Image (cartoon, rainbow, N blue to C red):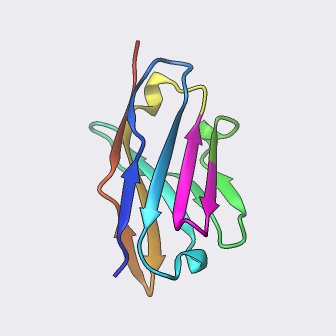
Amino acid sequence: QVQLVESGGGLVQPGGSLRLSCAVSGSRFSAYVMNWYRQAPGKQREWVATITTRGTTNYTDSVKGRFAISRDNAKNTVYLQMNSLKPEDTAVYYCNTVALSTAYWGQGTQVTVSS
C-alpha cells in the first residue's frame, strides 16, 4: 500500500507562484515514476507533469516553461513548482504513482488563481 499526501495549495494572484509537495509512504519511493494531475471544476482530470526514477521530466504543453517537477528521494517527496500562474491553472492538484499495476492517488490540494 502506498499513501500520498499533497500540500502547499492555496489562493494566489495571477503571475504568482506556489510550490506543491507530495509526501509518499514506504521505502520504494526512488523506484516510482511520479506524476502530477489536476482537475478543474466541470472538467476531466488532466495530466500535468511526470518525473522518472532517473529525474527525466515531461510536461503538458500548457505549463511548459512555467512549472517544474522535482523529487527528493531522501525525503520521499515530489514537488511541483508553479510560476507565472494563470486563472486557468485553478484546479485541484493530485499526485499519482503506479506500483505493481495499481494506481495510487493523494487526496488533492486546491490551487486557486484569482485577483
Towards the viewer: 67 or 61: 67
Towards the viewer: 26 or 105: 26
Q: Main secondary structure of the magenta part?
A: strand
Q: Residue at x 72, y 63 (%)?
A: 56
Instruction: Place residue 17 in its image quadrant.
Output: top right
Q: Residue furthest bottom?
A: 100
- Determine if the magenta segment contains residue 65: no
Quadrant where the C terminus is found in the figure: top left
Vertical placement of residue 52 versus 113, above or below: below
Towards the viewer: 2 or 51: 2
Q: Residue at x 41, y 73 (%)?
A: 25
Q: Residue at x 63, y 55 (%)?
A: 70
Instruction: Place residue 75 in its image quadrant.
Output: bottom right
Q: Range of the magenta residues?
A: 69-82
Residue 108 in the image: state x and y as whole percent. 33, 51
Quadrant where the N terminus is found in the figure: bottom left
Vertical placement of residue 110 versus 95, above or below: above
Number of labelled discs?
0
Vertical placement of residue 73 versus 59, above or below: below
Residue 76 in the image: state x and y as whole percent. 52, 68
Residue 3 in the image: state x and y as whole percent. 35, 71
Instruction: Place residue 8 in its image quadrant.
Output: top left
Q: Residue at x 48, y 51 (%)?
A: 21
Residue 87 in the image: state x and y as whole percent. 44, 23
